[in-house]
Amino acid sequence: MIEVSGLSKLYGSFSAVRDLSFSVRPGEVLGLVGPNGAGKTSTLRCLAGIIPASGGSIRVARHDLATNPVEAKRALAFFPDEPRLFDYLTVRQHLAFVAKIYRVPDHEQIAGPLLEELELSEKVNELPGALSRGMKQKLAIACGLLHSPAVMFFDEPLTGLDPLGIRRMKDSILRRAREGATIVLSSHLLHLLEEVCSHVLILKRGVKIAHGTIAEVAAQFGSAEGAVNLEDVFIRATGGTED
Amino acid sequence: MLSAVVYLRLNSLRNLVWSRVRRLREPKYLIGAVVGVSYFYFVLFRQTGLANGGANGLSELSNTAAATALGIGSLMLATVMVFMWVMPSGNPGLTFTEAEIAFLFPAPVTRRSLIHYKLLSTQLRTLVQSLFFTVVFNHRSFADGRAAQVILGWWLVLSVVNLHYMAASLTISRLAEGGVSATRRRFAVSLTIATLFAGALAWIWRELPPGPVEVDQVPEWIATVTGTGALGWLLWPFRALIEPFFARGATELALACLPAALVLALHYRWVVGSNVAFEEASLARAEKRAAKANALQRTGALHVGEEPRAARREPFSLARVSLPELAFLWKNLLSTSRPWFTGRNWLAAAGALIVVSIILMRVLGDRYWVAGGTIAAISTMIGGAAIVYGPLLTRLDLRQDLVNADLLKTYPLPGWRIVLGEILTPVVVLTGAVWLGLLGWWLGLHGHQPPALSETWFSPGMRIVLVVCGAFLAPWLIALELLVPNAAPILLPGWFQTIRTPGAGIDLMGQRLIFGFGQIFVVLLALLPAGGGAALVMFIINALVGPAAATIAGTVVASVVLIAELWCGLWLVGSRFERFDVSSEPRP
């Protein structure tokens, strides 16, 4: 469960996110979309507690991120667009390190099936330098899933993945949502959002333009001709420009 | 958190050492390691006497000398720490890698735990640095068994410097959060320092006898001024940190360590007690560092500036030129991070040089040689540096563009024209600097004959010949010098990629040494025929006609040989570039 109320983020005098409020319930997948510079990454970083919000409140799994950050963060996982790994830790050691940070008991029992699922079992003793881009991405995902987070944030989750990797990632996100996870993801790939997301939130210059289920947002920005896809909705909602 | 840090650091260190040892199976790394170790042994250890033993310099200092060293050391340490407040590097905040941010910032750890993680992480580096500084600056302590004391001294100093840096960064972050601008902060810090300094000076003026008259009294005066009164109090924390270096015996060392430990503990308390949101600045720092490492790997460029937002003035009109090589020159001149070199700027510099020289000639009259000599000397240094160091330092050529090799190979041009086009920019820039140097040299010597210069070879008439010949020879010479380092990535892509790889290691250092010395050796070898031919012709013509004709003939011969070598080199490198396997080019 994520509850955001009046979130704002300032960089000096520049306002990246303004008075943003929404909530995401367990089992829901919220797609965060918007033109370049809309404030998607700033929003995700604030939600994940990577950078502090300038105003408003964020509750993750019923814990306030500002006043109780440790408990809130224990329930979440953040997956950046680029896998950022330690150069001199092997795959197995990355998981062991994460297990120590998140205090995951018997992490090897969880790590085994996870590595199997992500096809990393044969790479456990490899350093990141010996892994392909896709493998690194999988390792970052394995590290994020090790503590079984209830809330997940994905920033451009399909960057650098091959078609098979994209299919598996989509299935994985949907399966986690079905199992009760609360998921927020940002992406420019609108067809992905249509396939995966139950809800969508459109941002433009840090301000919420639309929020709701895909059907609700489509109805809000639809036309008399009938059904429209998310791409049409996005273009109509944002006016087709970054500004 | 402690166990996680220890796990991360120990495993990273073990894997790092193991991967470095494993890569020695490749001959290029093994050879690099042998050269690197030899360099350290012969240049550092052997020269400094570590391998042979020796006496400890610190233990031999007299009381006055030790007090003077303490005073100077504490002043230096104070200056370093003041600079952390006045001129902090980049964004304030703690330095984390991108991986640390990705794993730790969203993790269930408190901000205080992150600070402890940072403190513990820096300790390993501090210990290695302490050992390194002891080897470099206090190597003799290993001979008389005081190495542990010196390492402890360095550890105390470096730990407090690190802590102070972190504390300053966090405090500056807090001030920035509170709306205090960098200008206001600098003003406040400078004013505080100036006030304290003025107060200390006033005390010295009132309380101490007048300054030293005799040179041999200077050390004692420095020791008194920095160790007593107002300045003594101000510098006390800094002196406390340095005193363990000078302790004689275990008891004295233990007593000296107590105040130093107090300073360390206070700094620790300051850092840990800072509840400042440093995450945003740390993120910005990490992204900047990653961009810098990426740029270094891709282009070899150490400077990563802001991306240009406004179009720059074109160096010349591309529509007016027909040679495709000049398009590369145009592109590379536009691509420089500091686009100061333009024809207009060169003409302005030459004009200013002429105007200043004429004014000085008029004003100084017969005494112009005083200023002129300086102008000639500085100009000679600028011109000489452009020829000797310029080709080693510049990167505005094929080496920078190699990341675009796949694109370059699609151009409908023979390889030699691409290589020529790519090296034109540094040739033009460095030739411009050499020509300015020649102009300054000629103007500086105008109207006088320094006794150190031969009246035959440096007569007023001969100087014009020398300047014109030097100006004619410069571009060919510089082009040949530049061709060698540009040939290296094409002929030895594997080595070139390795030496640009960000990272350390004695094997990589050895490879860089081999590569650097190899380049210098090849350039000297290439210059040998031109130099030898020119010297022979000059010797004969000088005997038959005179120095002016000999200089002109020597220049013609040297130029012909250089141009021939350059053409052969361009053809060779160009043809290799046509067959260059882009999959072996340096990629991030």
Image (tube, coloured by chain):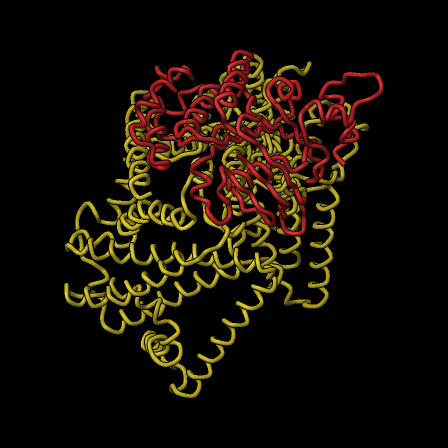
Chain colours: A red, B yellow
Tally of numbered tags: 0
The answer to whether residue B471 of the structure is visible from this angle is no
- Residue beneath the point at 69% across and 30% down: B331
Image location (x, y in percent) of residue A186: 60, 29
Q: Is residue A175 visible?
A: yes
Camera-side residue: B473 or A241?
A: A241
Q: Is residue B332 left or right of residue B228?
A: right
- Note whether B302 is above or below A132 in the view shown: below
Q: Is residue A44 left or right of residue B83?
A: right
Q: Residue at x 14, y 63 (%)?
A: B250
In the image, taking residue A181 as reference, residue B235 lies left or right, namely left
Query: Foreground: B460 or A225?
Result: A225
Decide which of B336, B200 is in the foreground and name it: B200
For the N terminus of chain B, give its image quadrant.
Answer: top left
Q: Nearer the viewer, residue B51 or B101?
A: B101
Q: Position of residue A217 (x, y in %)?
A: 72, 27
Q: Is residue A176 left or right of residue A213?
A: left
Q: Position of residue B500 (x, y in %)?
A: 46, 30
Residue positioned 56% across, 24% down in the render: B402
- A195 relative to B152, above or below: above
In the figure, residue B240 lies in which quadrant? bottom left
- Where in the figure is residue B86, as x and y percent of width and height? 52, 61
